[in-house]
Image (cartoon, rainbow, N blue to C red):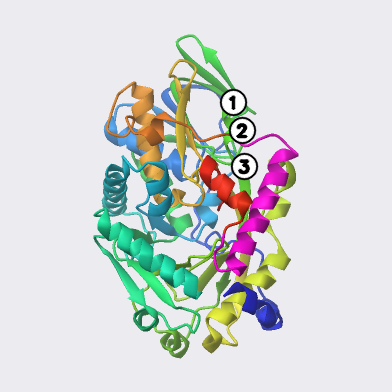
Amino acid sequence: MAPSAVSRGSDGTKALSEAQPVPYWLDDPGKPRPEPALTGAETCDLLVVGGGYSGLWTALNAKERDPQRDVVLLEGREVGWAASGRNGGFCAASLTHGLPNGLTRWPEEIHRLQELGARNLDEIEKAVARHDLDCDFERTGEIELATETYQAWELRDRYAEMTRVGLADGVEFLDAEAVREQVASPTFQAGLHDRRGVAMLNPAKLAWGLKRACLRLGVRVHEHTPALTLRPYGAGMAVGTPYGQVRARKVALGTNIFPNLVRRVRAYTVPVYDYALMTEPLTADRLASIGWKNRQGLGDSANQFHYFRLSADNRILWGGYDAVYPYGGRVRSEYDDRPQTYAKLAGHFFTCFPQLEGVRFTHVWGGAIDTCSRFSAFYGTAHGGRVAYAAGYTGLGVGATRFGADVMLDLLAGRTTERTSLEMVRKKPLPFPPEPFAWTGIALTKWSLARADAHGGRRNLWLRTMDRLGLGFDS
């Protein structure tokens, strides 16, 4: 789909003329007021650092496990302002960044990982109902799309492999006619329809709802309170902030792409900047022209892929394709806006849906995702088990962070559980090399992936070597 999209760049640019460089989900008058910053000294049983999904689920699950536990959560800016409020809102059951990645890395555990992931998504759905999380939760599933002939064959082969190993329950292969009955695009040649493994939601509303639930259960939340230092203090830990300090028996770090307070963890992640567009609400006629009746999430299967979905008010979110790594792995607000990527994405949009000619984009934005070399989260402890961390979700953290929260709580409790016994939890990915080697390797990988997309999926020597080493770069 992408190469032919370049010819439509002017059409896309015109559609961007009134778009605001603001994340659509965060541009909401119902956004809650921030909680006061921490001043002075506090003590608690559990300190959670980070007010995204990772930290919010950890605080909430900790209180549900033990309502008497004294829990404090620190957020450097405002709850949900970073990746948790900017993502596409795909809440997937997968804990392994998709089944192919899981089969490659953990074939002996894949059935267990799939079961745990499905159970985790069920628990998220239950939590949405139990805590009245008003986040437009819709368990509509997802279709992975082929837009090239070779991709259609790859999806067919993958479905056959899933069937062979007993992991095709709830999944259906769709040929070109069947997939276009679901969503009408001249670019779609086949699809794998996962009917239950993905839910669509409003990501910012999920974060804000989790914050309200935490507050109702007695979690003390402090926003605009960055955690600056971490050091042992007696039998526990002390975390310093600009205006105070928190002393805690245990600490859970859910900072993901931002610098981890355990310095040795930092080499395992790099930031990838991802970008998205949001259209104006579609009229009934325009919505009918694409036939998207069942509201599934969609994503194509190229290396440089697009993801797209309908919002509650029938806008289309269209994101992905470019995955931008800044030299040195810096996370800066100026990287959140990238007009050249918006123009490229808009051109691709109208190639996919030419019947939507004339639709305007209202919002454009970007943000950093933390990726690691195996594309899925890793876990660990520090300071004699008094500190736990999880990071590296690589774009699938909307659902998997809840599982990661339970892993951190298990690790802090010193318990051997079904989760902590997983090889995925016990072992870490390979770290990224220092600069300039990281930037050079990532640039070569991106070039090779684009070349593979343009040449029938054929992977060059560099990619084949990376595959053998279990290394990669993704968003």
Identify the residue at horizontal 64%, vertical 57% (top origin).
448
Give the extent of the magenta segment: 432-458
Residue 102's mark? none
Query: What amino acid is found at the position of numbered circle 2 in the picture?
Result: Ala
In this view, the residue farthest toward the bottom is 285
Q: Position of residue 417 (x, y in %)?
A: 28, 29
Identify the residue at horizontal 30%, vertical 58% (top origin).
162
Q: Is residue 140 above or below residue 131?
A: below
Residue 267's mark? 2
Tags 3 and 2 touching, CB below 8 Å:
no
- The residues tagged by marks 3 and 1 sit, at their Cα atoms, a distance apart of 13 Å
Q: Position of residue 103 (x, y in %)?
A: 37, 48
Q: Position of residue 36 (x, y in %)?
A: 54, 38
- Label 3 sits on a secondary structure element that is strand
Residue 205 painted magenta: no
Query: What amino acid is found at the position of numbered circle 1 in the picture?
Result: Arg
Mark 2 burial class by Cα count in 10 Å: few <14, some 14-19, many 20+: some
- The residues tagged by marks 2 and 1 sit, at their Cα atoms, a distance apart of 7 Å
Q: Nearer the viewer, residue 54 or 347?
A: 347
Q: Position of residue 198 (x, y in %)?
A: 35, 60
Residue labelled with disc 1: 264
Mark 3 burial class by Cα count in 10 Å: few <14, some 14-19, many 20+: many
Magenta segment, prevailing SS (helix, strand or loop): helix
Residue labelled with disc 3: 270
Tags 2 and 1 touching, CB below 8 Å:
yes
Q: Is residue 461 above or below residue 277?
A: above
Q: Nearer the viewer, residue 158 or 321?
A: 158
Q: In what quadrant of the picture does the N terminus appear?
A: bottom right
Q: Nearer the viewer, residue 105 or 178?
A: 105
